[in-house]
Image (cartoon, rainbow, N blue to C red):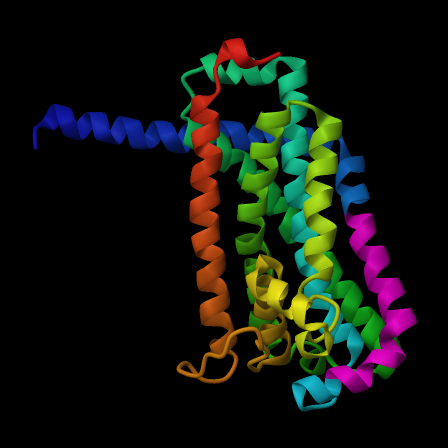
């Protein structure tokens, strides 16, 4: 390989990293300057967590314990679902931010700039990742506070896998968010309208949440819901986070026995999410590459 080729490859690699950093800084500045977006996107999951545990907690704990084969609080059962919901909402706002760029003319400037299209998507996604880390940490802490007030449970009783497990739950939320971030950005590029983007992603978001293992064990749901839940990515995100929460295999939509314990849930769930991330992330980058200045209105 010639020296010239090697230098060109290094320059290209450095350029991609630099482009990603430029895009990431820009979106972080926007977030800091508009904290209302961050707080408002966290409000819905917080309301779900508090209301669901207060209204359904006493009723559902017997069903949850029977499903898991051990005594369990509905709070610890619900927190993983709220974590995934938080990641979805953060991913949704990514597409809304894309529409704002289109409407302000910034997206047109990006199209004619030398920024790498993959770096544009990656930098924007990383800004959402930072938000997700902060918000999921808040959800986990609030869940612990609620459980402590309710039962006086210790941290080890809250997350059976300890601090590493809590860190793993944050990573699951990040892995889960990427594919929905891609969808919200694709919808934004197709509609180029903020209201249409919000409606489209919400139409996807809420039915998917309820047609999954998020709020109830799969086995107590109608048979047609169980079928849909098997094909629903939310099920795999929630089950992965829930396996870390309880330190055991919790997946019922597919039966895996070759890894042992919670890994029978984590390995297939994380594998499915990773494939979705790669596939839909590629679609999002394709749409960015296909966009042209003349198409921006």
Instruction: Give the quarter of the image for residue 93.
Output: top right
Residue found at x 67% / y 64%: 212
Residue 162 vs 133, above or below: the answer is below
Q: Residue furthest front?
A: 224
The boundaries of the magenta stretch are 42-64
In which image quadrant can residue 45 be found? bottom right
Height in image: 293 above or below 171? above
Residue 270 percent location from the top left of the image = 48, 63
Give percent across and percent down for residue 268. 46, 69
On the rendered structure, is 253 left or right of 283?
A: right
The N terminus appears in which quarter of the rendering?
Answer: top left
Q: Residue furthest top?
A: 294
Front-most of 24 and 57? 57
Residue 171 point in image, percent of width and height: 55, 59
Q: Position of residue 131 (x, y in %)?
A: 65, 45
Quadrant for the C terminus, please: top right
Is residue 137 visible in the rendered image? The answer is no
The picture quadrant where one finds residue 259 is bottom left
Q: So how many labels did they put on this image?
A: 0
Residue 49 within the segment the image draws in magenta: yes
Q: Decide which of 19, 97 is in the foreground and name it.
A: 97
């Amino acid at each position: 390989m010639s020296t010239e080729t090697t230098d060109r490859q290094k320059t290209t690699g450095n350029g991609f990293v630099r482009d990603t950093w430029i895009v990431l800084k820009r979106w972080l500045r926007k977030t800091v300057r508009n904290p209302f977006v961050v707080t408002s996107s966290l409000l819905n999951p917080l309301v779900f967590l508090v209301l669901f545990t207060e209204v359904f907690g006493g009723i559902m704990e017997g069903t949850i314990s029977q499903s898991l084969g051990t005594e369990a609080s509905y709070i610890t059962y619900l927190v993983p679902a709220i974590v995934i919901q938080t990641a979805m909402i953060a991913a949704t706002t990514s597409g809304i931010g894309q529409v704002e760029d289109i409407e302000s003319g910034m997206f047109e400037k990006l199209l004619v700039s030398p920024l790498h299209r993959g770096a544009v998507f990656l930098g924007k996604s990383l800004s959402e990742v930072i938000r997700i880390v902060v918000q999921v940490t808040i959800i986990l802490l609030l869940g612990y506070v609620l459980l402590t007030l309710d039962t006086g449970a210790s941290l080890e009783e809250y997350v059976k896998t300890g601090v590493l497990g809590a860190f793993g739950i944050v990573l699951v939320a990040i892995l889960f968010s990427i594919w929905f971030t891609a969808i919200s950005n694709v919808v934004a590029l197709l509609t180029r309208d903020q209201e249409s983007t919000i409606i489209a992603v919400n139409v996807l978001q809420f039915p998917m949440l309820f047609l999954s293992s998020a709020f109830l064990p799969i086995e107590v749901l109608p048979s047609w819901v169980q079928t849909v839940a098997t094909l629903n990515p939310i099920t795999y995100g929630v089950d992965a986070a829930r396996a870390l929460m309880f330190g055991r295999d919790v997946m019922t939509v597919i039966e895996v026995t070759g890894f042992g314990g919670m890994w029978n849930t984590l390995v297939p769930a994380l594998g499915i999410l990773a494939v979705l991330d790669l596939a839909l992330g590629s679609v999002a980058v394709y749409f960015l590459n296909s966009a042209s200045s003349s198409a921006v209105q």
